[in-house]
Each structure stands twice: as C-alpha cells, then as structure tokens.
C-alpha cells in the first residue's frame, strides 16, 4: 500500500503541493524500508525524518492559514495533531514490540488513510480558499 501522487492531490499552492509530494516520497520510502526488512534502526531513522518533516510541513501550512485568516484553521490544527499522535503511537509500538507485520499493516493503513483524507478534503478546501482570497485581493487593488 503506497501513496501515489496525481492531480487529485494538488491544492494549487506550489509550496504546499511540493511538500506533499516530498512527504509522499518519504512515506513510501518508509514503507519500502519496512517491506524490505532493513531492520528496526532504518525504520526508526525514517520515522525520525518523517516526524521532523511533517512538523515543518504542518508549521508552514498553519502559518499560511493564520496569515490568510483561514476559517478552518482550528480543524486543521486538530488534524495535524492527530497525525503527530499517530506517529508517536507507531514509534511506541516499534520500540515495545519491534517492527512486526501487524504493526506495519497498522502503520501503512493509518498513514495512507490520513494523508488521502487530509489532502483531498481539508487541504483542497484550503487551496480553494486561498485561490478565492487571492482573486479578491487582486480585485481590491
């Protein structure tokens, strides 16, 4: 199970779209590391990177939302925290039980479900809001 970038994920904001592409690449690398049996250390290193990059992405996205007074900012923040919590749960399970088949299936399902829903719904809405806001700003000038 992997995330595959296509036009349905584009929100129309170049920086956010590029970060989403990078996140998908890194998530898929994470899945590949698990599937290839590279070992717990490699899986945890990839998880480290994923946590750092995700936090940067969420920070950037939330800053844009604050700057444009996005009305669903709080909902986005809650969803971002949900994903952070999922990554913490995954780390805990890997530390406690190792990188088992059941844990990897859980991880893959949770991660793919989150990103597909988050981008195609919440971030798409943000993209539409930003487009409308930019059009209104252009008219006002």
Image (cartoon, rainbow, N blue to C red):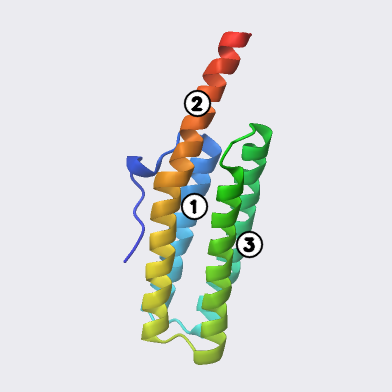
Q: Nearer the viewer, residue 40 or 7?
A: 7
Say few, some or many: other residues with alpha carbon within 10 Å of mark 2 (under 14 / 14 to 19 / 20 or more): some
**According to the image, label 2 marks what residue?**
131
Which callout, 2 or 3, points to the residue nearer the camera?
Answer: 2
| Dot placed on the residue nearer the N-terminal end, 3 or 1 | 1
Label ID, residue 33: none
Label ID, residue 22: 1
Residue 93 placement (x, y as % from top left):
52, 84
**According to the image, label 3 marks what residue?**
52
| Dot placed on the residue nearer the N-terminal end, 2 or 3 | 3
Q: Nearer the viewer, residue 55 or 26?
A: 55
On the picture, is 140 further left or further right than 120?
Answer: right
Q: Residue at x 57, y 13 (%)?
A: 138
On the picture, is 36 further left or further right than 93?
Answer: left
Residue at disc 3, secondary structure = helix
Residue at disc 1, secondary structure = helix
Which callout, 1 or 2, points to the residue nearer the camera?
Answer: 2
Q: Residue at x 54, y 56 (%)?
A: 79
Which callout, 3 or 1, points to the residue nearer the camera?
Answer: 3
Q: Residue at x 56, y 49 (%)?
A: 75
Whether 13 is drawn above or below 94: the answer is above
């Amino acid at each position: 199970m992997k995330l595959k970038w296509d036009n349905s994920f584009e929100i129309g904001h170049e920086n956010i779209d590029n970060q989403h592409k990078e996140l998908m690449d890194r998530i898929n690398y994470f899945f590949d590391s698990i599937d290839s049996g590279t070992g717990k250390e490699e899986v945890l290193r990839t998880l480290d990177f994923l946590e750092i990059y995700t936090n940067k992405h969420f920070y950037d996205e939330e800053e844009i939302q604050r700057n444009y007074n996005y009305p669903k900012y709080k909902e986005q923040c809650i969803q971002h925290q949900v994903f952070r919590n999922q990554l913490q749960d995954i780390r805990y399970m890997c530390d406690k039980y190792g990188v088992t088949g059941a844990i990897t299936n859980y991880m893959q399902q949770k991660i793919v479900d989150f990103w597909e829903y988050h981008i195609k719904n919440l971030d798409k809405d943000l993209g539409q809001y930003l487009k409308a806001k930019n059009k209104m700003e252009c008219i006002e000038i």
